[in-house]
Image: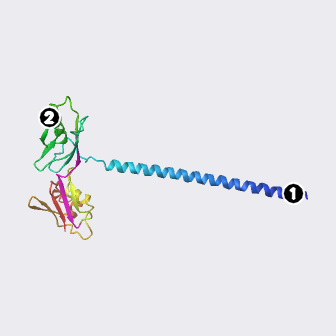
């Protein structure tokens, strides 16, 4: 009888301990799941922030060297003067129009130089105006890549770019491309480019810097 009672007591203790251990294990698993979710949310948030920074509203140009041209889109900000601030485009005649000060020549100037021009013009009406001009969209300087290319189309010419770099930016040639007979159309002239030589470091004189309006054709 005593022995049976001992077995019964041992079985009861084991039954009580088992759910407690399962509950503890389940709690640890839940905590690990919550930790993983937090890490995933942090990673997603970091990626979202990076994407937002990468797709900022201003075009990546040097305000002291990039020369503006027709169709470029600018953001003009004048501190505490919202009636003058806003988005403007450089017209085909090379000028922009702003409230109060009228037309100002923008073509051929840099954003920095144009900022100085606008600041000087506004000084007639306001004391020490604070002006900032940034490029929102580049539309004046562009080049084209078409033919047997992965991602052909129009591309903004923001920084000095060679033919080889332009082809790379466009995703590279397809497997059917004739790499020895690539041409660049420039102001009525036809320039030759041998891709196979260029990637081998040969005949590098042909790997010229692009100019606005250049058209690369990959046959």
Work out whether residue 155 or residue 89 is closer to the camera in this orientation and state it: 89
Q: Which mark is residue 5?
A: 1
Decide whether residue 137 is among the magenta residues: yes
Prevailing SS of the magenta stretch: strand
In the displayed structure image, the side of residue 84 where residue 48 appears, left or right: right
Res. 200 in view: no
Decide whether residue 184 is among the magenta residues: no
Label 2 crowding class (10 Å Cα cut-off): few <14, some 14-19, many 20+? some
Q: Secondary structure at mark 1?
A: helix
In the rendered image, the residue lying farthest to the left is 188
Tell me, yes or no, whether the two marked residues, 1 and 2, touch with CB atoms within 8 Å.
no
Res. 184 in view: yes
Q: Residue at x 91, y 59 (%)?
A: 1
- Gap in Å between the C-alphas at discs 1 and 2? 103 Å
Residue 55 at x, y percent in the picture? 31, 50
Q: Quadrant of the C terminus?
A: bottom left
Q: Which mark is residue 104?
A: none
Task: Report which residue position mark 2 lands on.
Answer: 121
């Amino acid at each position: 009888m005593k022995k049976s009672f001992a077995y019964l007591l041992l079985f009861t203790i084991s039954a009580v301990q088992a759910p407690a251990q399962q509950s503890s294990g389940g709690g640890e698993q839940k905590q690990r799941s919550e930790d993983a979710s937090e890490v995933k949310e942090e990673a997603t948030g970091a990626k979202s922030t990076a994407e937002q920074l990468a797709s900022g509203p201003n075009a990546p140009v040097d305000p002291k060297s990039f020369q503006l041209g027709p169709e470029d889109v600018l953001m003009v900000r004048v501190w505490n003067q919202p009636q003058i601030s806003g988005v403007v485009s450089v017209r085909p005649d090379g000028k922009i129009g702003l409230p109060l000060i009228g037309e100002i020549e923008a073509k051929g100037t840099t954003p920095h130089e144009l900022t100085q021009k606008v600041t000087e013009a506004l000084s007639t009406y306001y004391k020490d105006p604070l002006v900032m001009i940034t490029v929102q969209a580049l539309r004046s300087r562009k080049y084209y890549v078409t033919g047997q290319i992965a991602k052909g189309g129009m591309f903004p010419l923001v920084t000095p770019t060679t033919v080889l770099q332009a082809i790379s930016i466009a995703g590279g040639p397809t497997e059917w491309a004739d790499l020895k007979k690539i041409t660049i159309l420039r102001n009525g002239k036809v320039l030759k480019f041998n891709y196979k030589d260029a990637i081998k470091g040969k005949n590098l004189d042909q790997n010229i810097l692009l100019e606005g309006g250049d058209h690369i054709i990959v046959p």
